[in-house]
Image: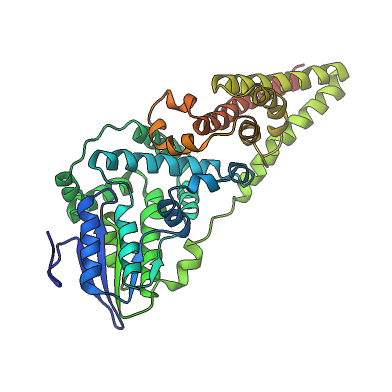
Amino acid sequence: MPFPKNSYPDDVAVISLTDKTILLVGTAHISRQSADLVEQVIANEKPDTVCIELDEKRFAALANRKRWQNLDLKEIIRKKQLSTLLVNLILASYQKKLGGKLGVMPGTELLRAARIAEENNIPVELCDREVRVTLRRAWHATSLWKKGYLIASLIASLFDTTELDEEKLTELRSKDVLSELMDELGNALPDTKRALIDERDIFMAEKIKAAAGHRIVAVVGAGHMEGMQRVIREDNRDIIEEINTIPPVSKLWKIAGWSIPAAILLSIAAIGFRQGAGEAAANALFWVLANGIPSAIGAVLAWAHPATIISAFAAAPITSLTPVIGAGYVCAFVQVMTRPPVVKEFENVGTDIGRIRGWWQNKLLRIFLVFIMTGLGSSIGTWIGGYRIFSNLFQS
């Protein structure tokens, strides 16, 4: 139903600051009612600026239905961003699956906000932090033990069968329910929640306050409403640069990354010195086989191209001796070159990703399978090969 000006539901918070008034509109990204509410608020208010919870890449992905044609997988692999792309696909698939049941695609209300603003010649500001920065900071903040919990949760979301209707979405948008959900995430993964939610609350609040004009409409996910209303009155400009930076790899991890390969090579050399060149060669061969065979088996299980399987066997023994690049990236690159996915498979990935068979049938998802399974095989081989070599080193 239409809402008269100044008579909005609880999904809209009016925040008065010294120099501007901000109307914060909390939405569910797969709700038709949210899309209608956004349109009504912008039409009623005719604000100076409309801010939306998107970064440039996510906005382009939503607005451009043919975005897959411009996706350069080889460049993504070169930049070692396959993991980020996979997480994005999983999250997008989950929202698309729920939205499809309601006939509403994820982000409809954000696109509608941009369209209504454009029709009324109102500037649009993209106020969210770049998704790659958010995911990298969340992963970096998550402890080693809880990374497994996070991965399991992502995988579980692929096969979630939750049924939603607009009545349930109305409940989901209520502040009490969302506060409870955020508290649950905070209890299970407090550091992850800080990077995914709290830092973005601060980042978006500062971007919105910096937007031009005195009356601003800001469209954000309902899960951010409580946090943003709390921090928007604070001055957090001095920490924006810090929370918008991908944390560097710690020196400890760098040392650990190079120490294992160094220990392997030094152990083989020591075996040669103590037991002869023949033993050193035998241990080196075992290293090659221990790494190459499991990685190649991973490629076979992923239905990789024969050239990818050969590459897995050849690359794993070498990449295991350097933390710079893993066998998974090498094999994924070869798979892209030999079996590139077609546009239709990009378009169907949101559906295929939720079916076990879809991972093998869809060439794009098969690239991720190759990446994961060859990398896993190489990791297994590193432990087996390393154990054998260290055991031989200390034999009398």
Q: Residue at 79% of width from left, 16% of height from top?
A: 282
In the image shown, does 383 or 49 lie closer to the viewer?
49
Residue 195, image x, y percentages: 42, 54
Q: How is the image coloured?
A: rainbow
Q: Viewed as shown, does residue 389 lie left or right of 222? A: right
Q: Residue at 28% of width from left, 40% of height from top?
A: 100
| Identity of the residue furthest to the bottom in this view | 19
Q: Viewed as shown, does residue 137 lie left or right of 280? A: left
Q: Quadrant of residue 371?
A: top right
Q: Viewed as shown, does residue 365 lie left or right of 215? A: right
In the image shown, does 251 or 370 lie closer to the viewer?
370
Q: Residue at 28% of width from left, 43% of height from top?
A: 99
Question: Against 97, is 338 above or below?
Answer: above
Q: Quadrant of the N terminus?
A: bottom left
In the image shown, does 206 or 59 lie closer to the viewer?
59
Q: Quadrant of residue 394?
A: top right
Q: Quadrant of residue 90?
A: top left
